[in-house]
């Protein structure tokens, strides 16, 4: 049983979490679950990830991989061969499209196809200005002095 969650109270009280809340809403709306092609997502280190998809029977020129902003789209289209008469068809051979929502600053480093496994390596590169930095704390003697300005009220005639 799946229940739909209402994220509208979070939108009213949070700032800067729009992408995360939109992703949660989209995940709660997902109606169909595709099981083909099967895939694994592995965290190989603190900032490195790997997606491994089993795409047996699909060649490199039948695969298309694109990254649009924070979305990685992997699609495949099996070329020809539909003129055969199958007595049993147990190997999936249709087209597919798999979407992966990527966090900010995650980019595809490399991709390779070996023995029917598509391996996609991803890396999170946080810009230098967004990394934690230590801030120097000065004593009262080194602080620049600022003058307090007083605003005078206008005199009104009675």
Image (cartoon, rainbow, N blue to C red):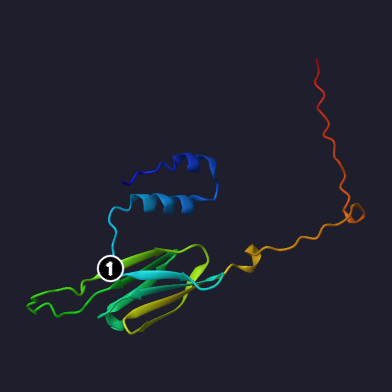
Q: Nearer the viewer, residue 69 or 53?
A: 53
Residue beneath disc 1:
36
Q: Badge 1: how crowded within 10 Å, few (<14), some, or many (20+)?
A: some
Q: Nearer the viewer, residue 27 or 126?
A: 27
* 120 up-or-down from 141: above or below: below
Residue drawn 71% across and 63% down? 133
Residue drawn 46% across and 70% down? 42
Residue drawn 29% across and 70% down? 37
Q: Secondary structure at mark 1?
A: loop
Q: Is residue 61 left or right of residue 91?
A: right
Q: Position of residue 122 (x, y in %)?
A: 48, 73
* 139 up-or-down from 12: above or below: below
Q: How many marks?
A: 1
Most extreme residue toward the bottom is: 114
Q: Nearer the viewer, residue 123 or 129?
A: 123
Q: Position of residue 115 (x, y in %)?
A: 33, 84
Q: Position of residue 105 (x, y in %)?
A: 53, 66
- The quarter of the rendered structure image containing the C terminus is top right
Most extreme residue toward the right is: 141
* 103 up-or-down from 95: above or below: above
Q: Position of residue 98 (x, y in %)?
A: 33, 66
Q: Nearer the viewer, residue 146 or 104?
A: 104
């Amino acid at each position: 049983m799946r229940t739909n969650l209402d994220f509208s109270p979070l939108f009213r009280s949070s700032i800067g979490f729009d992408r995360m809340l939109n992703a949660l809403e989209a995940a709660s709306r997902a109606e169909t679950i595709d099981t083909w092609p099967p895939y694994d997502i592995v965290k190989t280190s603190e900032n490195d990830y790997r997606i491994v998809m089993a795409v047996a029977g699909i060649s490199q020129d039948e695969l298309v991989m694109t990254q649009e902003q924070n979305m990685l789209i992997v699609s495949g289209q099996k070329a020809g061969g539909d003129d055969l008469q199958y007595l049993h068809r147990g190997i999936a051979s249709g087209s597919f499209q798999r979407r992966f929502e990527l966090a900010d600053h995650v980019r595809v480093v490399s991709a390779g196809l070996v023995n029917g496994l598509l391996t996609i390596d991803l890396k999170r590169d946080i810009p230098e200005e967004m990394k934690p930095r230590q801030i120097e704390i000065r004593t009262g003697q080194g602080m620049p002095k600022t003058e307090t300005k007083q605003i005078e009220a206008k005199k009104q005639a009675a």
